[in-house]
Image (cartoon, rainbow, N blue to C red):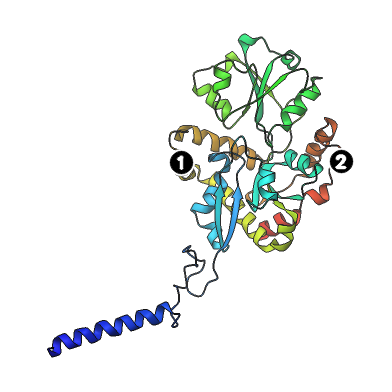
Amino acid sequence: MSNRRGIMVCSMLLAAVMLLLTACGGGATAPANVTSSGTPAAGGSGAKPLQKVKIQLKWVPQAQFAGIYAAKEKGYFAEEGIDAEIVPGGPDVIIEQQVVNGAAHIGVTSLDSLFVNRDNGLPLVSLAQVSQKSSYRLIAKKEKGIDAPEKMKGKKVGTWMGSQQFQVLAFMEKYGLDPKKDISLVKQGFTMDQFFSDQLDVATATIYNEYYVVLESGVKEADLHVFSLEEAGVAMLEDTLIAKKDWLDANRDLAVKTVRAILKGWNYAIDHQEETVDTVMKNVSAGSTTKGHQTTMLMEMAKLVRPPGFKPEDVGRFDDASVKRTADIALKYGLIKKPAELDQAIDKKVFEAAAAK
């Protein structure tokens, strides 16, 4: 064996020994800025691994949740030491169940739905109130002749189920219609196809989404009868952030950080709508929507999340009068059997701590 070849063999043996020592725990560690799962950790060298938080949406990816997607895109979760997983919802997803059974840590649901589920014994708490107005409308083609709520009697009325139907039920009760007897309540799907094909006489539409889907299809506003639940006096607060009580008690600091990142994301989304729409479009299902539609949605959502008179630091706060109105309507129209315990249903301290920084 020549000296040159002997040196090469020795070098190869030495490399193999070093590799074996490393594999056996010989002092080598993963890079300090990477967690055990491969997720970048906050703060670089010496930083703690990011804490995993699953956030359950109440619907499919869209600009309704622009603030959450912006928080992820701009690194606001990572800044708080959080690895956030955003879990899409849908018409058959019950957000409260997802949170209670541990499939998600924080969920986006409606405040009225939170009250209903608490009334049914689920230990859930609201952490921040994202939307400040009702977005719900009931729409009917003028050709159907439904120009008053009372004329919905005997008709097929569509709405989303799971945890999103309660405002519609309150609307029916207000106008003397028993949802179980006087109308045919139909589960409404992702699209407005049931409305277009006359499978529904009346459909539920949010002002930021389905209403514009109908208009974009070529239907004119003049050809519709539109019933605003806000104007009908049965408007209840919608998108709110919830958590299971025992998880919150054990992870209060993490909950505050998550809420802080989301609210920061919402203010960024409202102030940078064009950029944020691009972020949303990265997350939607291919072919499910258009950039123009998501642009309109974010424009309308901005009015609900930061309405006139709200400052950036107000985003997410609980308006006591609106909260009480939501609880009172839920009780008046039989959605809950006993008065909501607002001091237990809402944890204002989480929002206050999140907004303080």
Q: Quadrant of the C terminus?
A: bottom right
Disc 1 and disc 2 in contact, CB within 8 angstroms = no
Residue located beneath label 2 in the image: 339
Is residue 316 rendered to the left or right of residue 79?
right
Q: Which mark sits nearer the N-terminus, 1 or 2?
A: 1
Disc 1 crowd, CA 10 A, few/some/many (<14, 14-19, 20+): some
Residue at x 50% of width, y 42% of height: 273
Q: Residue furthest left?
A: 2
Q: Which residue is found at the position 66% from the left and 43% from the top?
A: 95
**Total number of numbered labels?**
2
Q: Nearer the viewer, residue 146 or 265?
A: 146
Name the outermost residue toward the right: 338
The residue beneath circle 1 is 281
Percent coordinates x, y for residue 332 in the rendering: 85, 31
Which quarter shows the N terminus?
Answer: bottom left
- Hey, what amino acid is under mark 2? Pro
Q: Residue at x 47, y 38 (%)?
A: 285
Residue 130 in sight from this viewpoint: no
* Name of the residue lying farthest toward the bottom: 3
